[in-house]
Image (spheres, rainbow, N blue to C red):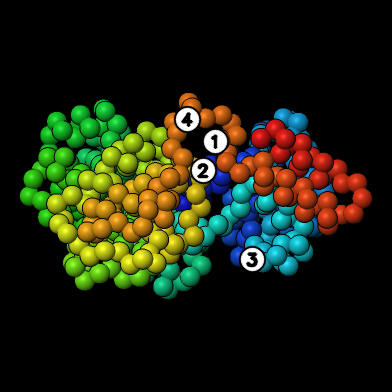
Amino acid sequence: MMPIETFIQQEILAPRMADKGVLVVYDHEHRYHGTCTSMESEHCRVVDASASSITSREQATQALVDLGQGRIEHLLVYVPASAPVDDDAKQKDPFSPFAACGRVFPDGDGDRFESLCLNAKPDQVLELRKVFDANPNPSFAVVDALGGGVGWPTLRALLGVESSRDILLALMAPSPAQEQALKAGDTWVNEARELLKSSLMLTLRTRGRAWSSIAEELWRYVLFSEFAFDLPYPLPDSLADLPKAPEAGRPVVFALCDDLRNDHRTQPVYIDRAPKAGAGVGPGPALRRDSRPGATRDLPIRGAQRAGARHRGLAARSRGWCAQRVGPPASLGVGCAWRKPAEVGPAARRPGTGPALRRAGRAVASAQPGHSPFADVLHRLAARG
């Protein structure tokens, strides 16, 4: 199974650097110092601000110039301090312009170390909860030691994947080869039942052993769980008895849905499954007028495609689970753009990059009266889209 540090590098930090080219990691606990510095490569410049903020600011400025001129592809700035949370703190932070033109980590509750561990090890939810209850700051080694034995051998061999996270994704949205393997027999079903119970606290109600029936119940459970977690108030009584994940499963549910929306291969599956999840439930109460699914968590939206998928799914499910829709579709964000990758250009794949760079350039110019090469670089990058 992938070590937690490798998971954070490959699944969290690297995609964010690839998104806008610049990533600022704020780490007041000094947990991720080695994680970040080990990502240095020919194409990735890592600036460590541990020793001197002045020197590292100069290094980061030069690295940004190199990024703009194509000499490097990515810039990672490691800051051993808490991220600024208000405008005053951002003005005092020498690295806030880099964060403004790129992305940051952590970014929301989903980036808490505990949430990342639950995302990486969804089948070890209960064990991880015990570890974090005993020590809110466990080491990577302690987390990696959980589930030391390699489990789910039939599923791993059948689906050609290693982690329990990838097994769950394959059960929900398999590739053509994986779907064929799942339909060819049922020797994997018992392992799947155990995995779903340990990772999502889902006890399958279906007695069928066909992949289609198991996948249908799994999708309904995961999508309704996300819907329930996203509501800013408790579920109405008439919906409260529907099967959904307990609070301990929230990070796993969010991570699964995020992965399904993020992958261009599985996005259409998510969109197709969302309205079907509410089918057959029957009339329910109207959602409250002040509801807005998604308001209860700080979810970084990676572009219009992902936002469109998520809000379409939430809106479709709200129509299925409730008797009437709340307001016009725009109130749930259903109007978000939804275009295929081939239909958009570089600027559309990185929404907001240009305006963010221009804002950062203005911030630097106002903080540094007179000529600012750094601000010039930001404006040139903004002009490139």
Identity, as a three-letter code, of the amino acid under mark 4: Pro
Which residue: 35% across, 70% down? 233
On the image, numbered disc 4 is attached to which residue?
341
Residue on which disc 3 sits: 85
Q: Closer to the N terminus: mark 4 or mark 1?
A: 4
Q: Cβ–Cβ below 8 Å for labels 4 and 1? A: yes
Task: Give yes or no for contact between labels 3 and 4 (Cβ–Cβ under 8 Å).
Answer: no
Instruction: Point out the image quarter for the C terminus.
Output: top right
- Dot 4, crowdedness within 10 Å: few (<14), some or many (≥20)? few
Q: CA distance from mark 4 to mark 2?
A: 11 Å
Can you tell which mark lies on residue 95?
Answer: none
Disc 2 from disc 3: Cα separation? 23 Å
Which residue is farthest left? 207
Dot 2 surroundings within 10 Å: few (below 14), some, or many (20 or more)? Answer: some
Nearer the N terminus, badge 1 or badge 2? 2
Q: Residue at x 30, y 56 (%)?
A: 325
Going from the N terminus, do you reach mark 1 or mark 3 first? 3
Task: Give the secondary structure at mark 2.
Answer: helix
Mark 4 vs mark 2: which is more N-terminal? 2
Q: Is residue 303 above or below residue 341?
A: below
The location of residue 135, given as percent across then percent down, is 46, 71
Tally the numbered discs: 4
Residue with the mark numbered 1: 349
Give residue 243's position: percent from left, percent from top: 20, 61
Q: Secondary structure at mark 4?
A: helix
Residue 199 in sight in this render: no
Q: Nearer the viewer, mark 1 or mark 3?
A: 1
Task: Give the labeled residue for mark 2.
Answer: 303
Q: Residue furthest bottom?
A: 134
Kind of residue sitting beneath label 3: Val
